[in-house]
Image: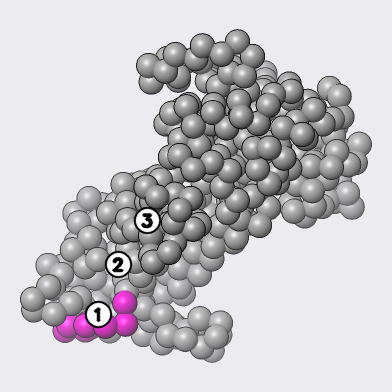
Amino acid sequence: MKKSTTFTNLVQMILKEEDVTRILEELNYVDTARKFTGHQLLLFFMNAALEQWDSFRSGVGQAASCGLAPVCFSTFSSKAGAVPYECFKRLFHVLVSRCNRSTKRHLKLPQELLLVDSTTITVGKTRLPWALYHGERAGIKLHVAFDAASEQPVQVEETLGTAHDGPIGERLAHKGYILVQDRAYGKIKRFDQYVHEKQYFVTRIKENVTMVSPHALKRIATETSNVSRDLTCYLGTPQCQSELRHRVVIFADTNGNEIRVATNLMHLSAEQIADAYKARWGIEVFFRWIKQNLNVPVLFGTTKNAVFNQLFAALMTYVILKWLYVRAKACVISCMSIPFIRFKEQMKHHRLQPEWIVAMARVMDKFIYLSSS
């Protein structure tokens, strides 16, 4: 494997051309191009995320250094707008199913935590007239379900920036996980619904939500605990009140601010409930990381297909980088360990140490073996 084509080759081994062709055929998209196919578009966009290209035009000038075939920027732009973004969305979920595996649990909980939140990317309204947001801005949202243990997104929904988070959050729910959500998802009727559906959740409630008929739960308080109250109650006013009693844990964050979370986890301690909600910071770190390191805020195109193709390609780039990093790190001696951000930068500039290159080769050999068996 040539040093200059490492990332491109890795992508091609994990997401093959036949994967792209099959999905495009299912979407009834006829790819008539002989050279710049849908698979080539995928490789261009994923390298654009890793290399942090500025635009279609600047990217084609750097394509050769990434092991990509030369192409003019207008071809790149036209293809990005023509290929239905549902293709890249499906590819993202194919990639997740291939790469994600359960990892060691960081919290002693019976199920993994699924962090649900959204991030908004905004630009001037003239760039995306189909996605008007507020005033002179246009924007789109990525709604993400994020596995706290593996630090990987497992499901993503795309909407306009004006879409409400709550209904999308219901679509991202998964009974195999404990949902951890912020106030935007704290609809009282939804809490009752989750109980009926046997969906575990830990959701922050808004400051103006009334707690009716509170009943304190027995607990053994410790000096180090930041939990101030642990109780069950009905939530809301008579006009809009929960049908069921819900557990509410009240605790202080690191800045001393009071946090109230509702949950149906009755078998865990209040401190465990508080720790589960604190883990929600993991998805905020993820959003910040992809925006700072994968060029997410720099939208190349102006059509819906071009925009979401770029964003789903960036998410796939993250999944591959994180997957490779975690598994290769396990094969590298501790003194050669490096942070994830440095791994990404060394991958970008082709400066990975030999120990890491060997470890990555082992990871890929195992992946290919398991894929073929």
Q: Along the polypeptide, which appears first: circle 3 or circle 1?
A: 3
Reading the image, the residue beneath label 1 is 209
* Quadrant where the N terminus is found in the figure: top right
Q: Amino acid at mark 3?
A: Leu
Numbered mark located on residue 132 in the image: 3
Quick one: label 2, few (<14), some, or many (20+) residues within 10 Å? some
Residue at the image point whose x is 85% and y is 38% from the top:
350
Q: Which residue is more in the foreground, 137 or 305?
A: 137
User: Which callout, 3 or 1, points to the residue nearer the camera?
Assistant: 3
User: Which callout, 3 or 2, points to the residue nearer the camera?
Assistant: 3
Secondary element type, mark 1: loop
Secondary element type, mark 3: loop
Q: Which residues are magenta?
A: 206-215
Numbered mark located on residue 186 in the image: 2
> Do tag 1 and tag 2 residues touch (Cβ < 8 Å)?
yes
Residue at the image point whose x is 50% and y is 81% from the top:
253
* Residue 276 image point, x, y percent: 47, 65
